[in-house]
Image (cartoon, grey):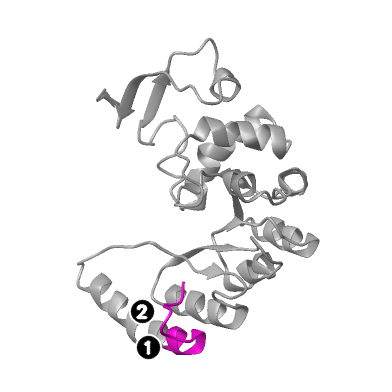
Amino acid sequence: SVPKDKKLQEYTQEILTQHIPKLKQLIDDKVISPTLVDVFHEKGVFESEETSAILRAAKDIGLSINFHGDELHAMNSAELAAQVGALAVSHLECISDQGITDMANNQIVATLLPTTAYVLRIHYPPARKMIDQQVPVALASDFNPNAHCMSLPFVMNLACVQMRMTMNEALCACTINAAASLNQHKLHGSLEPNKYGNCIVLEHANWEHIIYELCNSPIKHVIKKGSIIV
């Protein structure tokens, strides 16, 4: 967000002329290796013009775009995502029909955060409409001071009950599609040859109980790169 002692335009220029060049220097010097840029595209935070400028500048130094938008107000974030070539957009409670079409046409991942709607008592993102129009949908917990949730089973349950996703869709959304939202799907997100063997083993009667037992995750083993570590 914008610091309290600065105006939006002033802070945006600071990001464009100071922060991003410094970030590029750190990347070139191999001090850090970030892959994504995020901006909160929201009324009273970063407006459309400023969001677009920051995202495009970050893309110019090699970062992929994965930002938050269309949460509390209809900001045309999905349309902006298509314009700037975004990898993914999070929230999308207020996405437009044109935004859904643009995301589908460009295969931009919609990262839906149902805990936000649950806590704020706002309407849920139109997951069913997105999926039916071939938008790849991912799920995440939106863990933050507002939605203090680290339970993906609970998130998956909300997705099925409140957003009318199927269990299979919720599972894909938390695995392969989540990996795709971070551009990591070639190495993560599913168990298959030439991918990292990262997974957990749960003591459930069948996999659907991950969602059915929404607040119960009896983890038996944690496997990282094919080795049992817990």
Q: Which mark is residue 218?
A: none
Q: Is residue 12 magenta?
A: yes
Residue 192 x/y as whole percent: 44, 30
**Disc 2 target residue:** 20
- Neighbour class for label 2 at 10 Å: few (<14), some, many (≥20)? some
C-alpha separation, residue under disc 1 versus residue under disc 2: 7 Å
The residue positioned 62% from the left and 51% from the top of the image is 120
- Say which element carries label 2: helix
- Front one among 110 and 119: 119
Query: What are the residue bounds of the magenta stretch?
Result: 1-13
Q: Which quadrant does the C terminus fall into?
A: top left
Taking the image as shown, residue 99 lies to the left or right of residue 1, namely right
Camera sees residue 107: yes
Contact flag, marks 1 and 2 (Cβ < 8 Å): yes
Residue 63 x/y as whole percent: 41, 68
The residue positioned 39% from the left and 28% from the top of the image is 199
Residue 15 x/y as whole percent: 40, 82
The residue positioned 45% from the left and 51% from the top of the image is 144
Kind of residue at badge 2:
Ile
**Disc 1 target residue:** 17
- Say which element carries label 1: helix
Which residue of the protein is positioned furthest toward the top in this rendering?
A: 205
